[in-house]
Image (tube, rainbow, N blue to C red):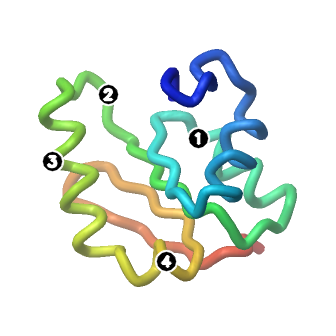
Amino acid sequence: MSEAGLDRAEDQEILAFARQGGWVCATFDHDFHAHLALTQSGQPSVVFVRLEGLDTEAQVELIRSVWRVCAEALARGAAVSVDGPSVRIRELPLR
């Protein structure tokens, strides 16, 4: 996010940036799903990674594998949680 000048941005700013650009957010911060629920927003999709201690290569491979499994849902609008072997997909807006 530093390339976009958002390395110190609030969650809402990051979500707005992703929504405008048609991006999917990948995060280790559970607050992103909470923001989606509070605003009843249908975009952007957010992937919440519930694993800590992953090196960069492991993070990239995990996100790639989630993308392969969830691409259609992410394109429509989804809140995805992944904790390794388990992937949970919830359509947006969250209720």
Measuring from the top left, give residue 91's x and y in whole percent.
Answer: 59, 78
- Label 3 or label 4, whichever lies nearer to me, is 4
Q: Is disc 4 placed on a helix, strand or loop?
A: helix
Check whether the beta carbons of the residues at disc 3 and disc 4 lie within 8 A of each other: no
Estimate how packed mark 3 is, as few (under 14), some (14 to 19) or many (20 or more) residues with alpha carbons within 10 Å. Answer: few
Precedes in sequence: disc 3 or disc 4: 3
- Label 3 or label 1, whichever lies nearer to me, is 3
Residue that badge 4 annotates:
75
In the image, residue 59 sits, relative to residue 26, either above or below, namely above
Q: Is disc 3 placed on a helix, strand or loop?
A: helix
Amino acid on which disc 2 is placed:
Glu
Closer to the camera in the image, 58 or 43 = 43
Check whether the beta carbons of the residues at disc 2 and disc 4 lie within 8 A of each other: no
Residue 52 circle label: 2
Could you tell me how far apart the alpha carbons at marks 3 and 4 are, in whole angstroms?
Answer: 19 Å
Precedes in sequence: disc 3 or disc 2: 2
- Label 1 or label 4, whichever lies nearer to me, is 4
- Work out which residue is located at the far top of the displayed protein and give it: 8
Amino acid on which disc 4 is placed:
Ala
Residue that badge 3 annotates:
61
Amino acid on which disc 1 is placed:
His
Q: Quadrant of residue 77?
A: bottom right
Check whether the beta carbons of the residues at disc 1 and disc 4 lie within 8 A of each other: no
Amino acid on which disc 3 is placed:
Glu
